[in-house]
Image: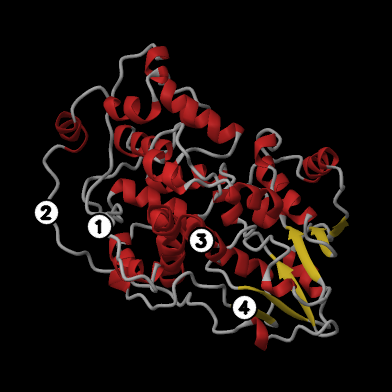
Amino acid sequence: MTQPPVRLTLATDRRERLAQIRTCFPQASGPDLDDRWQGGRVTALQRLATIDADAYHQTRNHLDGAATRLSPYLRHGCLSLQETVNSVRQSAGKRGVKLIAELSYRDYFRQVWYRFGEAIKQPMESPKVALGTQPLPDFIAQGFTGLVCMDEIVRQLRQEGYVHNHARMWFAAYVLHWLKVDWRQAADWFEQNLLDGDLASNHLSWQWIGASFSHKPYFFNKENIVKFGGGHWCQQCPVRCPFDASYETLHQQLFGAPPPQTGDEAAASHSAYLPVEITAQHLPLRDDSAVVWLHDEMLSPEHALLKSKAPRVFVFDPALYGQWPLKRLQFMADCLSEIPETDIWLGSTAQVLASYSQRHTISQNTPNARLKAAADDARLTWLQEPSLYDTHFSDHELMRFSRYWKKVEPLVFANDDERFSNDPAA
C-alpha cells in the first residue's frame, strides 16, 4: 500500500542534510555525495567563473585536462545552457567556439529527445556492425574486470558519479565491442550511477559508440589510453592487455570485415514530444491561482517560473528516484536548499499535486516521459524551456550532430564577420 506523502524540512547544515536524505532513502546505493560535488547554483557559478576556454580546447581529451565539470549542474538546471554559452562567449570570444560546440551537444541531444521521444531507447538506425546481446555481467558493476583502466572507471562512477567523457567512451566501447553486452542494459546501468545522468545524452552517446546513431563504431587501443590517460593504469595492470594492437588488427578481431560504406540513414519515426508554445509571461502566476512544480531538471532559484510568489513544490518521489544513487539524491537536496520557500515532500508526485487541487499546476516542459507520467495532472501547464538556438531542425538534421552544428554554428557569433571552421565528431 502506498504511503501518504510526508512533508520535509531540509536541514540547513549540510552534513545534517546529507544524513537526512540517507534516512529518507535507506535503500539508495553507494556512498554519500563527495565533497567535491556540492549541488546548487552557488557552486555552479563558481565553476563557471573559472573556465579557461583555451585550456579546454587544448587539453579536453586528456583525463587530467581542463574539463569544465559542469555537467551535473547543467543536467539539474542549476545553470541554464544559454547563460553558460553566453558566459563563454563573453569571456573567451571566438576562442571559445570549441567549448561552445561541445556545450551545444547538450542542446542537440535534447532536441533529438523531444523529436523522437522514447524511440531513443532503441536503435535509432541499423547498426553498422553486429552488436551483442549479452546481459551486463556482475564483474562489470562490481569493478572486477581485472583491467586496471576499466576497474578505475567503474570506481569513479560508483564513488563520485562522474567520469571524464573520454573514459566514458573507452568504457562503453569495451562493454559493447569486447564483451558484446546489450547496449540498452549497459546504458541504463551507467546512467543510474551518474550525477549528470540524462537519458538522451547517455543513451544516444552509447548508440554513437555502437554505430546505431553514427556512421561507424567507436573503439580504441592501448596507445590511445596511454596518450590521453597517462601510462599509470597500464603500468599497474597485471593482465595481458586486450587493447594492445593496431586499429586495423582490433577492427578485424572485433568486427571482421571492414564496415560498409553507407549513405545517410533514414530518420526514425518520432512521437509528438515537441515543446508546448507557452512563455512565462502568458502563464497564470498569481499567488492565489498557481503552484509551480519543480522537477529535477529545473533546480535553480533563478528559474523563470520562480519570479512570482506562487507556491513552489518539489517531490522526492520514490517512483522517479528510487533507483538513483544516494549521492545524486543528496546533490538535489543541496540544490533545493538554495531555493527558498519551497514545499518539499517525500512521496507520490501525483498525490502531492492533487493536494493543491485549488491551484493550477505549472512546470517546465520536458521530453522525459517518466516525469510527465508521474505528474498525472490534466490541469498541468508546461512552460516551453528556452532553446539555445532559435531555429527549426528537420529529422535529417537531427540524425547527426555535424548537420545540427553546420546549421547553428553561424548563429553562435551571428554579429561577427568572421566565421569559424570546426570539425565536431559526426
Closer to viewer: mark 4 or mark 3: 3
Amino acid type shown at disc 3: Gln
Is residue 81 toward the left or the right of residue 18 in the image?
A: left
Question: How far is the residue under mark 1 from the one under mark 2?
Answer: 13 Å
Question: How far is the residue under mark 4 from the one under mark 3?
Answer: 28 Å
Closer to viewer: mark 3 or mark 2: 3
Closer to viewer: mark 1 or mark 3: 3
Q: Quadrant of the N terminus?
A: bottom right
Q: Which mark is residue 90?
A: 3
Q: Secondary structure at mark 1?
A: loop
Contact between labelled residues 1 and 4, with CB atoms less than 8 Å apart: no
Residue with the mark numbered 1: 126
Residue 272 seen in render: yes
Image coordinates for residue 336, horizontal then vertical, percent: 76, 56
Contact between labelled residues 3 and 4, with CB atoms less than 8 Å apart: no
Image coordinates for residue 299, horizontal then vertical, percent: 68, 60
Residue 398 seen in render: no
Image coordinates for residue 389, horizontal then vertical, percent: 44, 72
Question: How far is the residue under mark 3 from the one under mark 2?
Answer: 42 Å
Tell me which numbered mark, 1 or 2, is placed earlier along the sequence: 1
Q: Measuring 87% from the left and 47% from the top, which residue is drawn there?
A: 11
Q: Quadrant of the C terminus?
A: bottom left
Is residue 77 toward the left or the right of residue 141 in the image?
A: right
Residue with the mark numbered 2: 261
Q: Measuring 32% from the left and 73% from the top, which residue is drawn there?
A: 395
Q: Which mark is residue 383?
A: 4
Contact between labelled residues 2 and 3, with CB atoms less than 8 Å apart: no
Image coordinates for residue 96, horizontal then vertical, percent: 42, 54
